[in-house]
Image (spheres, helix red, strand yellow):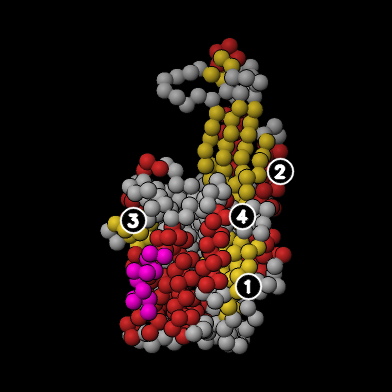
Amino acid sequence: MTVPPSSLPLPLSSSPLFDHVERHRDAFLERLFAYLRMPSISAHGTGIAETADFLEGLLGGMGLAVERLETPGWPVIVGRRSGPAGTPTVLLYGHYDVQPPDPIERWVSPPFEPEIRDGRIYARGAGDNKGQHFAQLLALETLLAVDGGLPCSVIVVLEGEEEIGSPHIAEVVRANRDRLRADLVITSDGPVHESGRPTVELGVRGVLSFELRARGANRDLHSGNFGGIAPNPIWTLVHLLGTMKDASGDISIEGFHDGIISPSDAELEAIARLPLDLAGSMAALGIDHLDAPAGRGYYERLMAFPTLTINGLHGGYGGPGSKTVLPSEAVAKCDARLVVDQDPDAVFAAIIAHVARHAPGVEVIHQGAMAPSKTPIDSPFVAPVLAGVRAAAGEEPLLVPAMGGSLPEYVWTKVLGVPALVVPYANHDEDNHAPNENIEVARFFGGIKTGIAVLVELGTVSGGGVDA
């Protein structure tokens, strides 16, 4: 796909919008730091109410109409501002909750005391996701300050439960579908491509998490006195897992692959254009071969094929030395990454049926799910978004048909029924979810400029105009 010329004035240094960002660098950083100091840990409930209050005040102070949508969990904050008639309505999604900072001892600086080291901002939430959606908000603020309005209508949706699986966002959107009507959704989350090139992603894989639990005797037993008498639940799970994925690497659960839509020729061409240093990537991971099955391309593995992963296998004794025990219970924690258009409920039903056939005594426990999502590569919004990213970054963006991980993008494409794109701002090594999470200072400010440029480009698209 050829990226069209930008509507922004070039060179970029001459843009009053970008000049405004440069003049306010110190103030923007100070405000980001104040936001990052708020813990907002959804798993614990820490700081959530205070952060939601802060965002209500921030959006209202920018001149957006603000709503607080309550859920059985943490609230969703919504802001809206209309642009010129006939322009698209763009919904900007982000999440204000963060992961717990544990293990604290591995942080070089305290997780909620932001610090700049070697050109990077270190703090929990710096990359995931406060730094990225705050850049979006500063883009709106800049447009309002310099131009006195927005180039298109905008709805901001900030969720407080993404880090615990977004359990309520779908029902919030269903209940408020008319109030959240938009022409396009943009999420800025996750890292850019490992090459450092700016990235636009059209989809995400879904995920299904589940647990397999096998039981033997009513207590742990002596392996000599009872071995061969009482069933070993670890062997039960080992044999069961062996029927779920064969030695060649193919997932062998009947019905698991139902609904899969293969990539289009245009998507395969986009995948082929992605830069890849396979040897370097393998060396960085400390591996000398890719997982089975053989014959699949690196990116095709992440975008076009589902996976079945054993996250952990637990039971019996794992301490030093030996203990000749016959365990009474064993647990396998698993996840499946799903591609378009697999249905997580149908896949889980297939797993239950498979277990019932091969190991009827094993319990299957649902742990959570998120559907996959993909926006067609020929969506009329793809070209202007690519043009905006290019204008801000000064280089051609990479178009990625789908990312390997999971985000609640299905809420927009399947529930709201609109195209949804991911435009990440963070560096590839942001260490999100880990100690020393970070975002490069340059990428934070690049995110503000990208947000500006993308909205300016979308303001030139005709045929939208859902009233925000």
Q: Are marks 1 and 2 in contact (CB under 8 Å)?
A: no
Foreground pick, 27 / 396: 27
- In the image, residue 86 sits, relative to residue 101, either above or below, namely below
* Amino acid residing under circle 3: Glu
Given this view, does label 1 or label 4 mark the residue nearer the observer?
4
Cα distance in 3D space between marks 4 and 3: 28 Å
Is 30 in front, or is 281? 30
Counting residues from the start of the chain, the first of labels 4 and 3 encountered is: 4
**Badge 2 amino acid:** Ala
The residue wearing badge 4 is 74
Cα gap from disc 1 to disc 4, whole angstroms? 25 Å
The residue wearing badge 2 is 353
Q: Which residue is mark 3?
A: 115
**Residue at coordinates 72% horizontally, 65% vertically from top-left?**
175
Name which of mark 1 and mark 4 comes first in the sequence: 4
Kind of residue at badge 1: Val
